[in-house]
Amino acid sequence: MGKKKNQKKTKKEIVKTEPPKILKNILGFLIMGSVILFVSIIRLRLLDVPLERDEGEYAYMGQLLLQGILPYTEAYNMKLPGIYFVYALILLIFGQTHTGIHLALLFVNIATSIVLFLLGRLLISNVTGIATGISFLLMTLSPSVQGFWANSEHFVILPATGGILLMLMAIERNNTKHLFLSSLLLGTAFLIKQHGILFLLFGVIYVCWSYLRKTPLNVRDFALNVGVFILGALIPFCVIVVLFLVTGNFDRFWLFTFKYAYEYVSMVTLSEGITNFKVVFTTILKSNLTILMLSLLGLIIIWYKETRSKWIFCYGFFIASFLAVCPGLYFREHYFIFLLPALSLQAGIGAHFIIKSLSSNTLRTAVSVCIMTIVFVYPVLMQKKYFFKLSPVEACRVTYGPNPFPESLEVAKYIHKNTDTNERIAVLGSEPQIYFYAKRRSATSYIYMYTLTEPHKYAREMQQEMIRQIESCNPKYVVVVTIPTSWLMRPDSERLLMNWMPGFLEQRYTISGIADIISPTNTIYKWGNETLSYNPRSISIIAIYTQKDNPEK
């Protein structure tokens, strides 16, 4: 009888406790949904921001892929090809426009926040998940990390965090199939950008540690699971290697993604890197101060009794994420997107600690809610002008200065109008977005000038190849960009291309268009005969040259 009473009492207790738990879950979903909606409204308002250079590169390469042209054949760059396949898929689904690309980014951003929400819930609590997801959504909005542009980092962290979440679930349930799928995702993250290998290495180390600490140690189980994980991680890269071997393009793939990439990451000194880090991180800190303070709290109180068992995972994930920002010591703004999932998770742990510590009565609960509100409202208030007032072009100028990203649209319209589909153009400057907008193929495989002006051993050979390609193709239009940031010339840069360019243009071409960037809000455009009498008023110019005696449409 006593046992039956206890069983009945337990059932009653379960019935009493279930509704509040369900209500908490519903409340959590409502909060996450509200923040997702809020962030989506801001992103949709600025959906029309022009493409920047990296986006232009990915979009142009994706465009070529849709035409059946593999990377490293008609266009070179050092990124691994995963990002080009991602962009090809985006262009296929959302259309070949800059707004379509940014709409895809919105969905990827939301998907990553949901993955992080689930990761925080799995690791610690519902509160951790909510705060993690919100922190990520708000920090990735920030212009301090160029958050409105679809840089490759966004597309690395979605499969990386998805793989890590699946990895934790697989280890918990000892599910080898899920472990294999998680490593496939982490291998895909690496294939999108080389930096993704840090997340993959973290996964391998954590899987090894998780199975080695089990007692008694089952050597067969350890070898099977670790082997399956490594196999899954290798498959995406092996598929790409086989693809380029079969198509006879492996040499170019290897030259640009590994040999030249090695030269690229060896150019910045440690002191320059530290300076770069300070400058960029200071801006990120100012924009997201309260969330980063919450992240710091999370890093410190991970030793708290409720979260202590997770310290290996949390610190390992944070270290891997930080190291992913570091290759080459360039510390560009968008590189820090790699760090945001780990910082968001630590912020979630900090939020869990505050709410658990202060929620023993109504007054303390109100205080904890006020603290969390301040934490998440502060970044929005700090950047409210950017989020709610600036136009897409103004937002682009604030983020990228006088770079010719808005002007690329107008230049491309002119070229598209005056060329046929099969006619080629050349852009002497690092503005690959012009090729994408104009829907015209390049006369040269070099779509960036940086590759040619950097002080490395391949520079002269690359410039010679570019000159040969342009001269033999004889493109209908040549676009010359005189903006310094489109070349990044150095005192020790190889100048073969610069010395060749004036004579080539004078012999074969005549000027037919000018975009003169006078100020952030004023660009003067001149077309046709108007260009002959126009004297540019700034050094930030895009000049369009057409073949002599070429009748324009």
Image: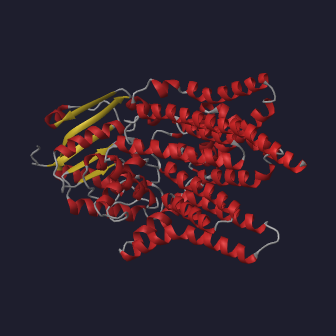
What is the quadrant of residue 75 in the picture?
bottom left
- Residue 462 appears left or right of 342: left
The number of callouts visible is: 0
Determine the residue positioned at 30% across, 33% down: 516
- Provide residue 180's location: percent of width, then percent of height: 58, 67
Determine the residue positioned at 52% across, 36% down: 36
Q: Is residue 253 above or below residue 96?
A: below
**Colour scheme employed for the rendering of this structure:** secondary structure
Q: Is residue 347 visible?
A: no
- Provide residue 393's location: percent of width, then percent of height: 38, 31
Determine the residue positioned at 40% across, 47% down: 55
- Residue 207 appears left or right of 465: right
Between residues 213 and 431, which one lies in front from this camera angle? Answer: 213
Between residues 279 and 288, which one lies in front from this camera angle? Answer: 288
Q: Is residue 328 above or below residue 407?
A: below
- Quadrant (top left/top right/bottom left/bottom right) for the C terminus: top left
Determine the residue positioned at 74% across, 64% down: 209
- Provide residue 222's location: percent of width, then percent of height: 71, 73
- Residue 521 appears left or right of 296: left
